Image (spheres, rainbow, N blue to C red):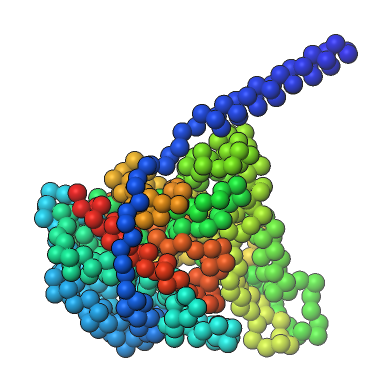
Amino acid sequence: MKKLFKLLLRLLLLASVVLFGIMLYNAFTIDSRQIVVSPVEEISVGDEVLDNLSSAIQLPTVSAGAIDSSAFKNLDTLLQKNFPLIDSLLEREVVNDFSYIYKWAGRNTRLEPILMLAHTDVVPVESSSKDKWTIPPFSGKIQDGYLWGRGALDDKLEVFSMFEAVEMLLKENYDPERTIYFAFGQDEEIGGINGAISIAKIFAERGVEFEYILDEGSIILEKALDGIEQPLAMIGVTEKGYTTLTITALLKEGGHSSMPPNETAVGILSKAIVSLQDNPFPMKIDGATENFFQYIGPESAFLQKMLFTNIWLTEGLITSQLGKKNTSAAMLRTTTAPTMLRGGIKDNILPTRASAKVNFRIIPGETVESVAARVREVINDNRVIVEAGENEMSSNPPPISPTESFGFQVVQKTIGETFPEAIVTPSLVIAATDARHYINLSKNIYRFSPIKITQADLKTIHGIDEKISTEGYKNMIRFYRRLFMNSSR
């Protein structure tokens, strides 16, 4: 028996040595996915670009129920006034009053065009949070090296930085080889039915397809992961799906609150929500997230390199560590977020019905239907009805775009030229973008916002104190100017 035990111990030790050797070999032999490019000279960008964006932020183009049409009209006037060369030299088409298609015609019609996406609407500011803003949310004030206000990060900065770059090139008499389209939607924040959905339909009816499409999405994040000192420039190659499920607890009888039964509709609903939060979707590394680690692995510190280049063995360890932070956990699982509750009409009446809205951001490999099925399984109560979302916001994850395409490589090259300190990697966008409505128009759809921000800045998107650094905004303009030139071949 002792001999058998010693033999097993030796075999276990040998297996451990072999595994460790394989891990070391993988870590030391993996090739870098970064490309070598020379940084370009930083061009001068004047402060007038800040005034243009500030003026736009002062216009409350909010998507939520009834819109302030005057704000959208004034934004249209602002675009035409501040970019006179674009207004006179590019073809312009208005879609559903406040969405726009611009066409910058290229010399070579044999080249497939590219499409740049952005949106002009912003989310509302909660009335209860207005006093918590350092600077009023629609002031557009420039202070302390930042431009403050709703839309400074999502997404007016994209519209204006693109147009500043185009206007600059037009002043230089630049004439692109490849046609460049711009599509600006008015309602991305509420699904895009009057903006992106309608614009995509127009392109489809005209038979227009694109070499690549670029929308907002992932960013350049400082201190993104332990073991990586350089900022990560993440190019979204896909995004999560989206659905909101209505979860309703129903009872046959209500009654007086002075004589409550053992279970109430509110209690049953609360239990269902707690069950969902106590049983989150499993984390996994595959597809876009696996590509992410393949790109950052060779650039990591030794310990992280060992982990990221041997995911076949270390996946559990990686997910357990990244799962501790909500920002990184969102990359690895379908997320569950109860957002709205409704039930009862008076404080002394037991309701027969109580409902909640629970929002899910769906990881590739899962669907709206599979999410709803799992929710029903976890709740496991026939008194609780789960209804899948049936609106324009509900969507499955789109296909993963390739990293070998011209589109990915030209974005990667331009990042290297304008943000040479950054590590470029494909990524999964954890939010929904207009890009999902264009999947039939190109196989190469990417989501990247050329802005360097911190973890703290991420919390201000749709939150309090949204702002962009003035120099960071100027760098966006420099990026787009270079991207348009690099794409013109």
Residue 145 or 433: which is nearer the viewer?
A: 145
Residue 64 higher or lower than 416, as above or below: below
Residue at x 70% of width, y 24% of height: 16
Residue 281 or 161: which is nearer the viewer?
A: 161
Residue 75 higher or lower than 10, as above or below: below
- Say if residue 103 shows up in the picture: no
Residue at x 29% of width, y 86% of height: 74
Q: Position of residue 331 (x, y in %)?
A: 54, 53
Quarter of the rendering containing residue 5:
top right
Q: Residue furthest right?
A: 2
Quarter of the rendering containing residue 8:
top right
Residue 145 or 275: which is nearer the viewer?
A: 145
Residue 118 higher or lower than 343, as above or below: above
Q: Position of residue 240 (x, y in %)?
A: 47, 56
Residue 116 higher or lower than 119, as above or below: above
Q: Quadrant of the N terminus?
A: top right
Residue at x 72% of width, y 72% of height: 267
Does residue 332 appear left or right of residue 267 in this picture? left
